[in-house]
Image (cartoon, helix red, strand yellow):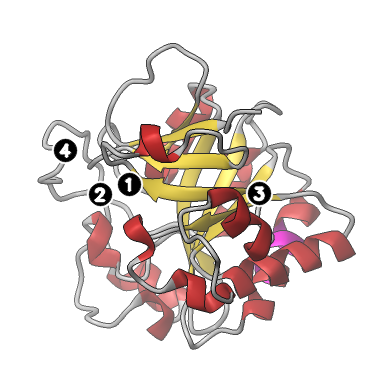
Amino acid sequence: MAATLLLLLTGCAPPTGDPQWIAWRAGAGHWPADSLWAAEEAIAAELDGVHLDVSLTVDSQAILLPEWPSEIGCTGPLDEPTWAHTLETLQAELICGSEADPDHPNALRQGAPPASLADLLPYLRTASGRTQLVLDLHTSREHSPEQWGPVLLDELLAADVPPPLVVVSDSPSTLAAVRNHATSRGRDLTTWLHVPLGLELGLPRQLGELEDPGDWDALARVAGVDGLVVRWDDAWPRRLAGTETSIVIRSPE
């Protein structure tokens, strides 16, 4: 059995073929990254998935931002990471999507405050059942792994939104906690683990030493996840040979 290949798109139109195509940051490069506008357009395009960054605020609210808002071009007087502020402060002080993106100079621009997960729910209700919602969790030491499940899943379950749910993180313990919470609520979800290129960040030490750090199937099995997220490099075709685990490749930005 060959690996299932999923590609996270960054500002390029999806070609035809067997891989699944997922709008990275809801279509960064076409629309403002992680914005409601981008999410609406990506859902309407009926791609295989819509990827969004998610962080927890200091008051434990889910907001569609990476750890550092400046990473997606948000501007404002806040110098601390997302988790250091309340949802109210972030939405009052930050404007995202109004500045030109040097990586994607032709992307459309529209300034707006960062959206919360609750703000996204009306758009998710319009999604087809085939479009996956891919939530990329930006963890911090300020929040325990167990805090993520209730914040993410309870709101989505209460809203009864149709998209299949995928949760992504570089933290195996966070993915395990979210999966356990989903199981307790009778909800199925898919988990993907971010893997640094070459595993140079010491991921095997988080999971216990692996006999072969290049054995993707063993890594996924030990981490208890359904797939691995990697950045593209020219060696991946060789590295993926014989792999059964789903591999999610981020295209170069």
Q: Single out the mark in the foreground, 4 or 2.
A: 4
Q: Which mark, by number, is residue 33?
A: 1
Name the spot of residue 42 as percent of width and height, x first: 46, 30
Q: Residues within 10 Å of mark 3 (few under 14, many from 20)?
A: some
Are the two marked residues, 4 and 3, in contact with CB atoms closer than 8 angstroms? no
114 lies left or right of 94: right
Q: CA distance from mark 3 to mark 1?
A: 26 Å
Q: Which residue is mark 2?
A: 97
Of helix, strand and loop, which one carries label 3? loop
Q: Which residue is mark 4?
A: 104
Of helix, strand and loop, which one carries label 4? loop
232 lies left or right of 187: left
Q: Does residue 113 show up?
A: no
Are the two marked residues, 2 and 1, in contact with CB atoms closer than 8 angstroms? yes
Name the spot of residue 159 as percent of width and height, x first: 75, 50
Q: Single out the mark in the foreground, 3 or 1.
A: 3
The residue depicted at 61 percent of the width and 30 percent of the height is 131
Which callout, 4 or 2, points at the residue further toward the start of the chain?
Answer: 2
Q: CA distance from mark 4 to mark 2?
A: 12 Å
